[in-house]
Amino acid sequence: MNAPRPDQALDAWLDLHAEALDSDPSRAAEVLPQLVLAGAAAAGVPKAAGGAGGTIADAIDMVAAVARRSLTAAFVLWGHRTFIEYLLQSDNPTLREETLPPLLAGEIAGATGLSNAMKFLSGIEGLQMHATRRGNGYALEGGLPWITNLRREAFIAAAAFDHDDGAPPAIFAIPHDTPGVERSDDLDLVGLRASNTAALRVKGTVLDETWRIAADARNWLLRVRPAFLGLQCGMSVGLARGALEATSEAAASSRDSIRAETGALQATLDEQAMQLRHGVLDGTYLERPAALFALRIALADTVTRAVSLEVQASGGRGFLRNQGGTARRVREASFIPIVTPSLVQLKAQLEQHRRTATL
């Protein structure tokens, strides 16, 4: 079965605007409509829910296809499609049925604000958001310093909240136009600047249970984590492919000396992409999350090596602005290790897993 891919119009648009999307925040409003128009957000969403059908592996392939041309656009797609996945795996069918159509139409942007929650799940930090029972609803307080796809036109963000009454932490969907919801100015990033990345605060925001994605955050996060990290890995796969493709297109005098390295790394990447696809489909990463942590770390190393080969092959030309995308991919590659959970956090989790396994 052939992996889904964006249509040719999106490919052309990304190729034309990738540099601007990386450097110019004023282009942020354009990204999601282009992705939705091309059907990228619908990949892996059941047809009965308004999507294109397929599996989460198809959604990962789509993220990779976009990342091959623009990590900014892939980062937006990751946030949007991951939020859609939250609804698909939610225990709130009403929220899913009411919110999926405008998400798939691009009328609102889905923002995955669960980096804090994933770190909480791994025991790295406490929850930064708090819920207090108020009548039939909850008064929400707290802030998250970094969320992508907080589209100014309209967004809905996921966040995990602890409860003052001792109930398990829960996941809520936070609509942008609810009183007390505040979006900061765009963060001053060194790249990926058209990704609508900002901080989010809620001050006395009151939501009832109709906005609750999951009542038991811990168990739900364990279930959704393979998709969260798998879609993230798609960004690494696509970026590495783009760098290796650029390396193969360099002048023969440059690429010949690194041909063996390039071929070996391409084979490694193909094997990693196959492992990723199989692992999210057969339940491996649900049963053995450490295997997915290790793959995410390995893919980051593959990205670093692929971009290094591209730099070597492009030579001085790659150090010029707007010349083939080499400099942009170097910036994009520097982002891969710090996407939450960062490589440092993942390595700490693997070390903890090893210590536990040997006790």
Image: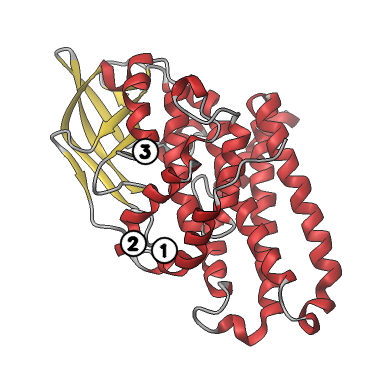
Q: Is residue 232 above or below residue 325?
A: above
Question: Which comes sooner in the sequence, label 2 or label 3?
Answer: 2
> Disc number at residue 21?
1
x then y, percent, for residue 102: 32, 32
x then y, percent, for residue 245: 69, 65
Q: Mark 1, residues whose alpha carbon is within 10 Å: few (<14), some, or many (≥20)?
A: many
At x 41% / y 68%, what residue is drawn? 20
x then y, percent, for residue 292: 66, 38
Q: Mark 3, residues whose alpha carbon is within 10 Å: few (<14), some, or many (≥20)?
A: many
At x 55% / y 74%, what residue is drawn? 327
Q: Nearer the viewer, mark 2 or mark 3?
A: 2
Kind of residue sitting beneath label 2: Arg
Asked if the residue at tag 2 contacts the one at tag 1, i.e. Cβ–Cβ closer than 8 Å, the answer is: yes
Kind of residue sitting beneath label 3: Gly
Kind of residue sitting beneath label 1: Leu
Which part of the image, by quadrant, shows the N terminus?
top right
Q: Nearer the viewer, residue 36 or 176?
A: 36
Badge 3 is on which residue? Answer: 110
Instruction: Look at the numbered disc 2 and give the secondary structure of its residue.
Output: helix
Badge 2 is on which residue? Answer: 27
- In this orientation, does residue 124 appear? yes
Among the 4 quarters of the image, the one containing residue 155? top left
In the image, taking residue 19 as reference, residue 25 lies left or right, namely left
Question: Which comes sooner in the sequence, label 1 or label 3?
Answer: 1
